Image: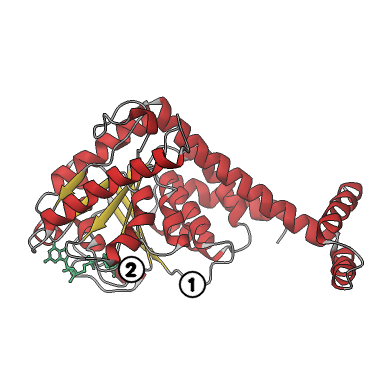
Amino acid sequence: MSLDALRTQAAALAARVVAGETRSIARALRNVDDRVPGYLELLKALFPSTGKAWVVGITGNPGAGKSTLTDRLIEALRADGKTVGVLAVDPSSPYTGGAILGDRIRMTRHANDAGVFIRSVATRGHLGGLSRSARDMVRVLDAAGFDVVLVETVGVGQDELEITRTAHSTLVVMPPGLGDEVQAIKAGLLETADVFAVNKADRDGADAAVRDLELMIALGSEALVASGKRRGHVVHGGVKVDALPEAPGSTPELWTPPIHKCVALRGEGIREVVSALEKHHAWVTSTEAGRERRRGRLVEEVREALRETLIDAATVALAKELDETVSAVEARALDPYTATEQLLERFRASG
Ligand SMILES: Nc1nc2c(ncn2[C@@H]2O[C@H](COP(=O)(O)OP(=O)(O)OP(=O)(O)O)[C@@H](O)[C@H]2O)c(=O)[nH]1
Ligand SMILES: [Mg+2]
């Protein structure tokens, strides 16, 4: 198909997505996830309609209760009259009453609610990376007009953690009683968290988990002081060196992640979690620090896209030279540093 034809087709699909047509949303998500030809044209056509949704990441250890809590969040947000799109990245356990696989997930108690759209994504086989695919799919849901987009992902692995960086607000779900293994997992999650939910508070050890987290947050601050890094900057996760020792407590420059206990299974403590997330949303959208953070994400995205595009272009333009260069380096006739400079020069000349 010609580029013009792809464009026309993409524009038509985009219009149906923006109109909120369920089947078109599903199709657009599939096209973007599978990167079928024309998916970039679709994303381009959708982009002007994005930027309105509140994107909330929900992450945490496997089995922490993310899906159960997500289900409760949907319920609470719906009660507030908000429409909700959900992207569940490789959910290994079902939503309440639902089945595991994507399309069937929608056959849950929210299935007949036109204000809710749930889609699951597999974690395998993403050429351009899972996080990019997830970000693009979030954009589809955003353009479709959902007030809130929830993204559930397991908080282990770089790719998964990366996904939460596309969110405005990230909720980290922790069960009590994780013991030592918690330390390892927490290091990554701590930086990501805007709000903590200690779920399964019906079990022993919830208060200890809260104290643990408080300590981790405080230690995180001290580690930054000790390293002397990032002075004067807002660090994701809300630890700002200059604001110490006044922390905890959030200011326009500093967001300190609050910790809430809940029992997702019984729907207890959900309101507090939602309201903490809403406060964070207000912070991220109304303060200079929040604006900087969102801009930082876009800088990353554009750089990443530029890097990919440049590498693709250079690999094509320099296919023969690359091969020769590697042979020269292999024979120790050329060092890799000079080789890179020479390749760059040739690429520039080829432009
Ligand atoms: N006791 C108790 N169990 C809970 C609570 N919330 C969730 N569970 C149970 O914990 C198990 C895992 O819940 P999920 O919601 O599937 O957890 P998840 O974090 O989405 O799991 P993965 O997606 O597999 O990583 C299920 O058996 C839930 O019923 C809670 O508040 N209390
Ligand atoms: Mg799950």
Q: Answer with the quarter of the image where residue 271 lies.
A: top left
Judging depth in this view, the residue of 307 and 266 nearest the camera is 307
Judging depth in this view, the residue of 25 and 284 nearest the camera is 284
Estimate the x, y position of residue 74 in percent, counting from the top left: 23, 52
Estimate the x, y position of residue 232 in percent, counting from the top left: 45, 29
Label drawn at residue 91: 2
Residue 81 appears in the figure: no
Label 1: few (<14), some or many (≥20) within 10 Å?
few
Residue 27 appears in the figure: yes
Amino acid type assigned to the residue bearing label 1 in the image:
Arg
Judging depth in this view, the residue of 80 and 226 nearest the camera is 226
Judging depth in this view, the residue of 281 and 332 nearest the camera is 332
Estimate the x, y position of residue 116 in percent, counting from the top left: 28, 53
Q: Residue furthest front?
A: 226
Estimate the x, y position of residue 235 in percent, counting from the top left: 42, 39
Looking at marks 2 and 1 on the same chain, the residue that comes earlier in the sequence is marked by 2
Can you say whether 136 is above or below 291 in the image?
below
Q: Secondary structure at mark 1?
A: loop
Can you say whether 261 is above or below 226 in the image?
below
Label drawn at residue 144: none
Label drawn at residue 124: 1
Amino acid type assigned to the residue bearing label 2 in the image:
Pro
Can you say whether 341 is above or below 333 in the image?
above
Residue at 89 percent across and 63 percent down: it is 334
Q: Secondary structure at mark 2?
A: loop
